[in-house]
Amino acid sequence: MGGVLLGIALVLLVFTFYVCYVYVLGVIAPTVPGEQDILTSFGGILGPIIVAGVRAVYLGLMVWIGAIILLRGVNIVTAKSEATVATPVAPVASTPPKTQTTTRSICSGCGNEIQPNIKFCPYCGAKQP
């Protein structure tokens, strides 16, 4: 499955770059559906800019889709190769969790338990000694 995705992605990317290259050389101009309508609606100045933007978005989406398919294929292929070449892991000696001893103080104003070494109580605002 990963090899098929890699093949599809590479064909899609090569095709997209080929279309972009041919467009830059001016051999063929890829047409946008409704291009004449865009040109007549927006005029001679804004129309070509909009058509060029639509072409750029099309090519960008093709590259984006090709890159996503390529990454999926690479992930599938590498996951299969990692599963077949699994190295044994030595057991790790378990250590007991460290217990954290914290001392708490009592607020002189309200009697709530507060953290040590603070200047004011977060509950009542009383200044601590």
Image (tube, rainbow, N blue to C red):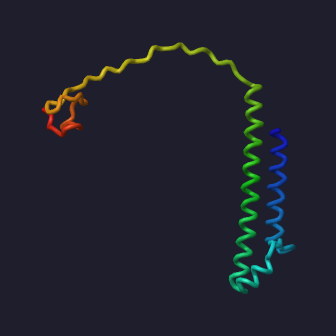
**Residue at 80% across / 39% down in the picture?**
2
Where residue 47 sits, quadrant-wise, is: bottom right
Front-most of residues 108 and 100: 108
Q: Residue furthest right?
A: 27
How many callouts does the rendering have?
Answer: 0
**Residue at 44% across / 17% down in the picture?**
97
Locate residue 95, reporting x and y percent. Answer: 48, 14
Where residue 74 sits, quadrant-wise, is: top right
Q: Is residue 81 left or right of residue 105?
A: right
Front-most of residues 90 and 42: 42
Look at the picture and state if 72 lies above or below 18. Answer: above
**Residue at 35% across / 21% down in the picture?**
100
**Residue at 72% across / 68% down in the picture?**
56
Front-most of residues 121 and 70: 121
Locate residue 72, reporting x and y percent. Answer: 74, 43
Q: Quadrant of the N terminus?
A: top right
Q: Residue furthest bottom?
A: 44
Q: Quadrant of the C terminus?
A: top left
Q: Is residue 92 left or right of residue 100?
A: right
Q: Is residue 53 left or right of residue 106?
A: right
Locate residue 60, reporting x and y percent. Answer: 72, 61
